[in-house]
Image (tube, helix red, strand yellow):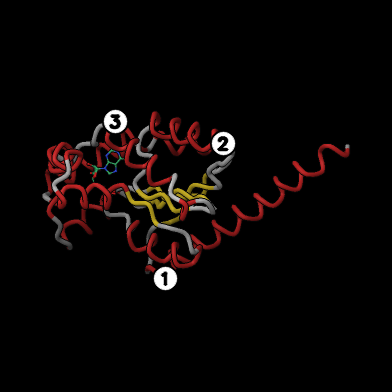
Amino acid sequence: MRIILIGPPGAGKGTQCQRLVEHLRVPHLSTGEMLRAAVRAGTPEGMQAAAYMENGQLVPDAIILGMVTKRLEASDCRNGCLLDGFPRTLPQAATLDELLERRAMSVDGVIELAVPRDELVRRMLARKRADDDPEIFSKRIASFEVQTAPLLDYYQRQGKLASVDGLGTAEEIFGRVRTAVERFSQRGVRRGHRERTRPEV
Ligand code: ADP
């Protein structure tokens, strides 16, 4: 299965992704992790990306798309993957659809981890990360609301969106995530069935 997990900064995507990749047995593709690794390794992409990341801004598509395309083409992604942090903008989503379509693949489902803004701020204050400076954190939330939230409509129109309540224990939330995944796979089976039977009609 090819699944996308979308959520604002601090929604608990990391925890849910970890559980979901174990459940689905697919690779975890996190653009945030890929970028942090590139920054640590001091690659040209990493050096370019660092300034944007430190400022809570999105890294330019030229860097992101090259990185993701290469990763998606790796053989371990043939049977599926969990996309985390990508796509983050409408152009990235459109590029992903084209990229998969050319390979006769598609996104099976998109899970939104929904958490109210005041809860995100409360969580941010309780944890510590380099880009969790309150001002930078606000910028990351604003970037989510302006650039990423429109993706929810985009996938809703494709009938692929499942919104999951991101409040509760990690275990409770994962139960909801699993239910969403089950629904995606049932729909996939139905869709496959329709496609197979169509020629006989
Ligand atoms: P979070 O989901 O907590 O915002 P991530 O680990 O997904 O954090 O990403 C960290 C940073 O990396 C982002 O703030 C952004 O600067 C950059 N980044 C990650 N993914 C993308 C992407 N798809 N497009 C542009 N920038 C990205």
* Circle 3 residues within 10 Å: few <14, some 14–19, many ≥20: few
Q: Which of marks 2 and 1 is in front?
A: 2
Q: Which mark is residue 171?
A: 1
Residue 75 or 195: which is nearer the viewer? 75
The residue furthest front is: 75
Q: Position of residue 126 (x, y in %)?
A: 17, 63
Q: Mark 2 points at which residue?
A: 158
- Residue 9 has which mark? none
Asked whether, in this view, residue 15 is left or right of residue 60, the answer is: right
Q: What is the C-alpha distance between the residues marked 2 and 1?
A: 29 Å
Q: What residue type is labelled 2?
A: Gln
Tell me, yes or no, whether the two marked residues, 2 and 3, touch with CB atoms within 8 Å.
no
Vertical arrangement, residue 175 with respect to residue 92, above or below: below
| Residue at x-position 43% and y-position 31% | 95
- The part of the image, by quadrant, that contains residue 57 is top left
Q: Where is residue 111 in the image (x, y as percent from the top left)?
A: 47, 50
Answer left or right for 45 relative to 17: left
Q: In terms of image quarters, where does ligand 1 lie? A: top left
| Mark nearer the N terminus (1 vs 3) | 3
Q: Name the residue under label 3.
A: 62
